[in-house]
Amino acid sequence: MPKLRLAVLGSGSGSNMQSILDAINAGTLDAEIVCVLADVEDAFILERARRAGIPAQYLSCAPFKTKLEGPAEEEWIRVIKSYGADTIVLAGFMRIVKAGLLNAFPNRVLNIHPALLPSFPGLHSWKQALDYGAKVAGCTVHFVDAGTDSGPIIVQRPVPVLEGDTPETLHARIQEQEHLAFPEALRLLAAGRLSVSGRRVVIAP
Ligand code: GRF
């Protein structure tokens, strides 16, 4: 299998990007991060990438605040292709991606969500789980489809909700599992073991 060529898209700290990079550097994930792109000019994910010698670039999504569409989407696709990426990793990218990007990389856009989908899609899912009174929270890595947090599920990792948890303590424990889940999902993809059948991701032995 050829090595995965990952374009990582983010908006914030980039701890998931770091976990993927750490797995690559440890020799446990056969992939290369070919570029890191952010829609926030001072996002720390860009700084992390630059420190690691990875091309890192801020790109505007104007005039939209919550989605990537229109001429900005065309520009993002052009830039991603210019780095020769074959897989898009949404690692804390706080925007809805639309058909243009998804059609340019069919079944090749992955997202991480801080809940056990289909529970608690949308924003601040760890707080949603806590407020709801769930006893188990977690994270999900899934292929992205046209809906919000609705695509076929690749990997999930549960996290118990503890007495005395605050949104912050629960989110921190969920993030520890995210940092295992994303490399795990990418390892399966890199090994050619994933196929999508309707809603289901089939994992070959
Ligand atoms: C993660 O909690 C992820 O689940 C959500 O955004 C956060 C990104 O964190 N989609 P980081 O930028 O990877 O540290």
Image (cartoon, helix red, strand yellow):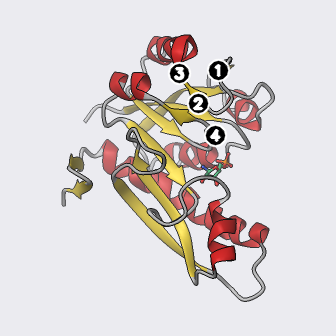
- Find the distance from the CA under tag 1 to the CA under tag 4: 11 Å
Q: Are marks 4 and 3 in contact (CB under 8 Å)?
A: no
- Find the distance from the CA under tag 2 to the CA under tag 1: 8 Å
Q: Amino acid at mark 2?
A: Lys
Q: According to the image, label 1 marks what residue?
A: 61
**Residue 67, numbered label:** 2
Residue 112, image x and y in percent? 52, 51
| Element type at mark 1 | loop
Query: Compared to 10, does 149 lie above or below?
Result: below
- Say which quarter of the image contains residue 103: top left
Query: Compared to 100, does 205 lie above or below?
Result: below
| Element type at mark 3 | loop
- Find the distance from the CA under tag 2 to the CA under tag 4: 8 Å
- Find the distance from the CA under tag 4 to the CA under tag 3: 14 Å
- Say which quarter of the image contains residue 176: bottom right
Q: Amino acid at mark 3?
A: Glu
Q: According to the image, label 3 marks what residue?
A: 69
Disc 2: residue Cβ within 8 A of ligand 1's nearest atom: no
Residue at position x 38%, y 34% in the image:
4
- Find the distance from the CA under tag 2 to the CA under tag 3: 6 Å
Q: Are marks 1 and 3 in contact (CB under 8 Å)?
A: no
